[in-house]
Amino acid sequence: MRYGHTILPAILMGAILLVGCGETIPNDPARNVQIAGCWTGGPVRDGTVAETESQLRLMSLRPDGTLALTVIHELGPRSRVWRYDFDVTCRGNDISWLAHEGTVSADGTTMHVTKNWKGEESRWMFVRAREFDGFMTRLMATEARGYDYEIPADAGDGWPCAHMESAGFNAAEMIRLMEEIRSGDHGDIHGFLICRQGRLVLEEYFALEGALQGPFVREVFRKRVHHLASITKAVTSVLTGIALDLGLLEGVRQPVFSLFPEYAHLNTGDKSRMELRHLLTMTAGLEWEQFRYPFSDGRNNAGEMYRTDDVPGYVLSRPLAATPGDDFQYSNGVATLMGEVLGRASGVDVAEFARVNLFDPLGISDTFWSRYPDGTLDTDGGLALRPRDLARIGQLLLNDGRWADREVISPGWIEESTRRRLNFRRGRGYGYFWNEWLLDAGDTSERVIFAPGDGGQFLAVFPAREMVVVITAGNYGQDPTSTYKTLFEDHILPALTAGTGPS
């Protein structure tokens, strides 16, 4: 089922919250023609539209001359595309559609609207963006009518590219998987990349739950950074290893509060036993809840952390629910605190530390990293990278910390950070912000090091196969791990086993 039929539950959790009004639309052909086309904007916060919330909205003329909102495309890192046919009402300078009501300037270039949803009111602003008319028309004209495999393009970015069959894949099996994605069988997957034996052998991009796919879609989305969600935590783990290699930290047994002297008054009870390794394994013991209640609920600690004016102080102030090291408790707070540790240890902003010590050595030049309102870098889920660049992180693990004959991180940390330290259900383990699986690969089991992220973001490293898989997606609110476990076991590993090339 496509997003055109299933999108409203997702919208309820996002920025585009709409409800029908059942109003008859007057037909004002001249005004409709003036407004028809592409508009850019989004919700207004602190007087401006945030870059991460900016979007394109296409207003289209129907054959009868009435106006409809037909396409929304997010320009921010989530990159989602939605198709609609929502009635738009114009009466002079007044405009409305569903939960939005507002005005359009007399010259048809600026729109200010108010959205009311479940008692919550927000302000939105859009400006006419004629320069995007052709883009949106071309994007929506790329409906997939069949999948044709192409060797990934040589972008001059250091990735050797090759045919998948030369890397041991059965092309027919992989083409069947791409057809399933194109048909929407795996939800709203945006990017799917496979690197094997140091070569990029598959690189595909999709939009609108697979409905849009082809050379133009590939060209557009290859160049754009994509939201990584909690894959960011694995990058934070890599940065921790670099800081240890540089001697900026004493070791993973260093007490957390040793780096936060101004919060000594919060170091009560057994909190003094909290060490960096407890942050990295999410066993700090701090009381934390971020799934049971809505983000806006004060009992949701992740939401409260976003609303505080002192993120590290908020996390450190949480009472202990368990002795440090005893219990796993998933927490964006400890991952964010680990980022603060890196900033304090290095003496520079964490984003700058990452640029100098990780991104530049890997040849990664295009990044986006969000912050909390108090300025704290979001090292738990705010990083956005191009999918090709995320694959470099995976290849770095395969190469024991080396890239282009340069040691970026020590092999010892690669082993330490990815080693299973906690055991979860269904064969899943956990290290220092890295996960581990033992997948069913026929007569054997396949060890996989991976990092998942909300929405279906995924970075998987198969050491024995010399393989990296990157998936980006827009399936927010869903746990991707079980879905992708099946995808790997039922599609990718069998396709590789059946391949005729080198193994």
Image: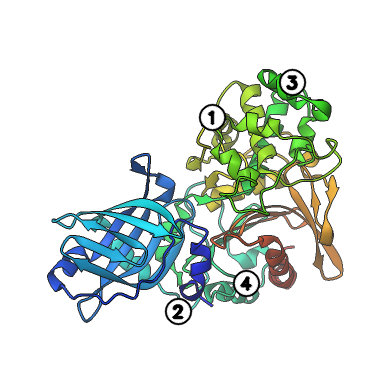
Does 168 sit above or below residue 410?
below
**Comes first in the chain, label 2 or label 1:** 2
Residue flagged by tag 4: what amino acid is it? Met
Q: Quadrant of the C terminus?
A: bottom right
| Measured Cα–Cα span from mark 4 to mark 3 | 51 Å
Find residue 352 and name its label: 1
| Measured Cα–Cα span from mark 2 to mark 1 | 44 Å
Residue flagged by tag 3: what amino acid is it? Ser
| Measured Cα–Cα span from mark 3 to mark 2 | 59 Å
Find residue 258 and name its label: 3
**Comes first in the chain, label 3 or label 2:** 2
Q: On the image, which quarter does residue 88 sit in?
A: bottom left
Q: Nearer the viewer, residue 463 or 127?
A: 127
**Is disc 4 placed on a helix, strand or loop?**
helix
Residue flagged by tag 1: what amino acid is it? Glu
| Measured Cα–Cα span from mark 1 to mark 4 | 39 Å
Does 105 sit above or below residue 249?
below
Find residue 174 and name its label: 4
In this image, 220 relative to 256: left or right? Answer: left
The residue carrying mark 2 is 145
| Measured Cα–Cα span from mark 2 to mark 4 | 17 Å
Q: Position of residue 258 (x, y in %)?
A: 74, 20
